[in-house]
Each structure stands twice: as structure tokens, then as C-alpha cells.
Amino acid sequence: MSTQPTEYSPRALRAKELFESGYNCCQSVLIAFEDLTGLDRATSAKVASSFGGGIGRLREVCGTFSGLCMALGMINGYEDPKDSTGKAEQYKKIQALAQTFKEGNGSIICRELLGLQEQKSDPTPAARTSEYYRKRPCAELCAYATQILEDALAQGAN
């Protein structure tokens, strides 16, 4: 699995550090964009709290990708439920980011990224030990998801 771009931005490194400080993967990515989303840290943490471990440790869509989606929605999502053009534009951006994420990592599915056979994990999170961080690509994926969204925003995805 190749998750490392040549260089991470300060924002991407911040997402990695947030994960390493105990936030879940989704929280780490969303909080890294708090200056652009307008959400304070507590609100970002609460909104993203259910999406760690591939949505509540169900090992479905990677929490880092969910955080990316939340951040993009807060930065330039649509509000009007009848705005079909806005919906289509937002979905197009998300699909392009999903493709980029898949190209870099092989999947956007948590269990596939972690090499797990199980369909879901026990709801109790694993202790955050040095062994935990050594075995999982999650901190790196936090940086990667943050970086690809930041790059997309710089290229006009907003």
C-alpha cells in the first residue's frame, strides 16, 4: 500500500498528530480543517465521533475519507435541497477524491486498508499503545486524506 506523497503539508501533519494524540481518524481529518470549516474543535470532534473505525468500528468506509467528505461539505457543500446542480458538483468532487484515495491506497474501505477479514470489530476501541500505532496505517491515512483534500482545494475544488 502506498500512502505517502513526497511531502506532507503542515495541515496534513497536524491531522496525523491529532490521530496520534487520541482522536479517531475521522475527527483528526475534520479538525485539521477547522480554520476552513468554521467548526470549533469540540463541534468537529462530536460530529465526527461516530465515524472512526470505518463508521463505529463497522470497518466500512474509512474514517479518514469520511472526515474528508465532512470537511469538503462544510467548506463548499450545498444547502438548498432542490439545488441539483450543487449536489451533482459536490458528488463529482467526492467521487474524484475517492478515486485519488483508492489510487494511493487501494481502497476506501477500512477493513481492506487494515487487511482485516472481519466484517466489523468489537465496539470497544483498542488501547492506543506504541504497538497499536506501529501496526496500523491510520495516522498515515489521516495525513494522506487531509493532503489530497488540501491539494484539491488548492486546485479549485472549492
Image: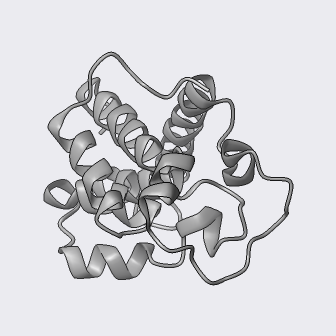
The residue sitting at 66% across, 71% down in the picture is 57
The residue sitting at 39% across, 32% down in the picture is 148
Question: Can residue 93 be seen from the camera position used here?
Answer: yes
Relative vertical location of residue 56 with respect to residue 5 in this rendering, above or below? below
Expressed as whole percent of the image width and height from the top left, the position of residue 41 reads 21, 74
Expressed as whole percent of the image width and height from the top left, the position of residue 137 reads 52, 44
Relative vertical location of residue 80 with respect to residue 72 in this rendering, above or below? below
Expressed as whole percent of the image width and height from the top left, the position of residue 28 reads 34, 60
In the rendered structure, the answer to whether residue 33 lies left or right of residue 59 reads: left
> Quadrant location of residue 33?
bottom left
Q: Nearer the viewer, residue 42 or 84?
A: 42
In the rendered structure, the answer to whether residue 39 lies left or right of residue 80 reads: left
Q: Nearer the viewer, residue 99 or 103?
A: 103
In the rendered structure, the answer to whether residue 147 lies left or right of residue 24 reads: left
The residue sitting at 28% across, 65% down in the picture is 21
The colour style of the image is one colour
Expressed as whole percent of the image width and height from the top left, the position of residue 78 reads 41, 58
Relative vertical location of residue 131 with respect to residue 49 in this rendering, above or below? above
Question: Can residue 83 be seen from the camera position used here?
Answer: no
